[in-house]
């Protein structure tokens, strides 16, 4: 590919494997930046070359920008792909890449900065004519927060302006709770992001989490690949995602997709990105939530219904090419579901379950895909996220996709550690899930019923 013949992959786990596969398909060499704990990983075995970037702890390896960029330059890599998590949305990475003559496979620095600050993102999106959740600007202290909350009306949600990943978020249902919760949220935001700035939003209790997959290039082309429903969450972390969103009117579907494109086009977005919205189930009004300026964990469900390789598109765009398709060429067919398979024990409040995989046999069959970095004998490290695999199924309709997912999970053989497979199967059997009658707090309600009361 013009300008890019070797890519440094600054990540680990299944997303590193996913990027290596995209590189191979494009005839590009892959260099894996691996910590000491990941030198024998599947990604390390698949990459053309491996360079060790430090100890197991992410703060000493995967989160060291200068080390990552030096590794790219030292290996003759023309580009860096950050995957998701770690440095993927750190604006200093593309900035330093630019200074060092290395291509960043992702959006321009300004897009990451603008969308990374939730207050600025709200302001910009509002200017584009897209609805945002009723809320405040920066809140200086708990007293001001209380006054604003009374104006907005309880319940409200406190959010970190620099937040993400569910951290720095607190729901407040009563005025008496606000002062203490404000102090807790500010401390959490300070610890997680180095920034204690908070703001308020009206809390919508029965909401759906809908996100629009965006692709943009440096030639002004911006398209969408449809939307995903990511409402099944536990502690703000997604558990099951699907595409397209079920129980949507055609008019609403088109409106929310257009809103995503409008936001991406106005900020000059390039690469793959996701615009996230909250949909009030009662009023069917949607509001902008945030934009993730990277490839998403759940991108495979969109690939399954669109036939578009999103990671390959990222690489092509970074090399200066135009998108390989226009909006009129996008065809979405069938329904896809993704389950996040993690090393956790649901019956022990989802405690992490690191250890060695004594058996690992992934399912296969029509309409099934398993994205993973695991293999028999692999040691699941306690240092990183507990994601073992993403199980994706595709069917002619949602019912078929659900049945295929149930088959896939029931026939996934994993021994040596605990996993969430029994809990995922429990969800898939629920009638309200089958009907698509869920919201962002539904899973926590189900958890309380299934586990916490035992």
Image (tube, rainbow, N blue to C red):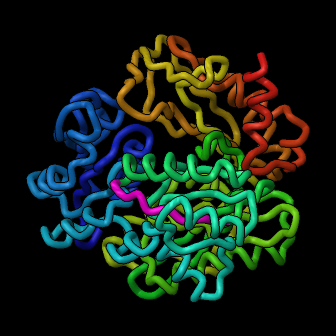
Q: Residue 313 colored magenta?
A: no
The residue closer to the viewer here, 119 or 332, is 119
Vertical position of residue 374 compared to residue 115: above or below: above
Given the current orientation, which residue lies at the most extreme left position?
74
Q: Residue at x 48, y 35 (%)?
A: 372
Give the number of callouts: 0
In the rendered image, which quarter contains the C terminus? top right
Counting from the top left corner in percent of width and height, residue 97 is at: 20, 66
Q: Is residue 24 left or right of residue 63?
A: right
Q: Is residue 178 above or below residue 199?
A: above
Nearest the viewer among 1 and 273 is 273
Q: Quadrant of the N terminus?
A: bottom left
Query: What residue range appears in magenta?
Result: 194-201
Q: Position of residue 427 (x, y in %)?
A: 78, 33
Which residue is located at x 32 percent, y 30 percent? 41
- Residue 84 in sight from this viewpoint: no
Q: In this rendered view, identify the residue nearer to me: 91 or 69.
A: 91
Is residue 82 shown above or below 452? Answer: below
Q: Nearer the viewer, residue 13 or 130?
A: 130
Which image quadrant is residue 226 in?
Answer: bottom right
* Residue 181 can be seen, yes or no: yes
Report which quarter residue 55 is drawn in.
Answer: top left
Question: Residue 130: x percent and y percent?
Answer: 65, 82
| Residue 164 image position (x, y, % from top left) | 49, 55
Q: Give left or right: position of 7 versus 119.
A: left
Task: Please tell me whether residue 66 is drawn above or below residue 354 in the rendered image.
Answer: below
**Which residue appears at 74% of the width and 39% of the height?**
443
Residue found at x 69% / y 30%: 408
């Amino acid at each position: 590919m013009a300008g890019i013949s070797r890519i440094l992959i600054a990540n680990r786990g299944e997303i590193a494997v996913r990027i290596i596969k995209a590189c191979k398909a494009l005839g590009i060499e892959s260099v894996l930046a691996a910590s000491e704990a990941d030198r024998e990983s599947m990604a390390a075995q698949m990459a053309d070359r491996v360079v060790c970037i430090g100890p197991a702890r992410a703060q000493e390896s995967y989160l060291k920008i200068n080390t990552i960029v030096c590794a790219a330059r030292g290996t003759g890599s023309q580009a860096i792909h950050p995957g998701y998590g770690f440095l993927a949305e750190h604006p200093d990475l593309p900035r330093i890449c630019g200074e060092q003559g290395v291509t960043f496979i992702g959006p321009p620095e300004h897009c990451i900065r603008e969308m990374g600050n939730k207050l600025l993102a709200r302001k910009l999106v509002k200017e584009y004519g897209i609805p945002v959740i009723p809320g405040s600007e920066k809140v200086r202290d708990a007293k001001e927060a209380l006054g604003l909350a009374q104006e907005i009306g309880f319940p409200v949600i406190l959010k970190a302006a620099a937040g993400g990943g569910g951290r720095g978020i607190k729901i407040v249902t009563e005025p008496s709770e606000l002062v203490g919760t404000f102090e807790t949220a500010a401390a959490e935001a300070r610890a997680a992001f180095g920034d204690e700035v908070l703001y308020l939003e009206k809390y919508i209790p029965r909401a759906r989490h809908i996100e629009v997959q965006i692709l943009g290039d440096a030639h002004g082309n911006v398209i969408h690949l449809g939307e995903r429903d990511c409402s099944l969450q536990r502690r703000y972390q997604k558990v099951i995602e699907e595409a397209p969103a079920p129980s949507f009117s055609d008019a609403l579907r088109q409106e929310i997709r257009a809103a995503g494109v409008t936001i991406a086009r106005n900020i000059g977005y390039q690469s793959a990105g996701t615009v996230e919205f909250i949909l009030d189930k009662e009023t069917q009004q949607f509001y902008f939530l945030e934009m993730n300026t990277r490839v998403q964990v759940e991108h495979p469900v969109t690939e399954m219904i669109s036939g578009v390789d999103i990671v390959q598109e990222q690489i092509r765009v970074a090399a200066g090419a135009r998108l390989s398709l226009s909006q009129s060429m996008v065809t979405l067919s069938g329904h896809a579901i993704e389950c996040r398979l993690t090393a956790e024990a649901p019956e022990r409040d989802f405690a992490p379950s690191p250890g060695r995989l004594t058996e690992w046999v992934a399912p296969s069959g029509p309409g099934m895909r398993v994205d993973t970095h695991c293999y028999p004998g692999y040691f699941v490290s306690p240092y990183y996220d507990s994601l073992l695999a993403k199980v994706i199924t595709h069917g002619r309709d949602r019912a078929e996709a659900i049945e295929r997912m149930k088959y896939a999970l029931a026939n996934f053989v994993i021994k040596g550690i605990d996993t969430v497979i029994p809990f995922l199967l429990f969800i898939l059997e629920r009638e309200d899930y089958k009907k698509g009658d869920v919201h962002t707090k539904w899973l926590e309600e189900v958890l309380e019923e299934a586990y916490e009361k035992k």
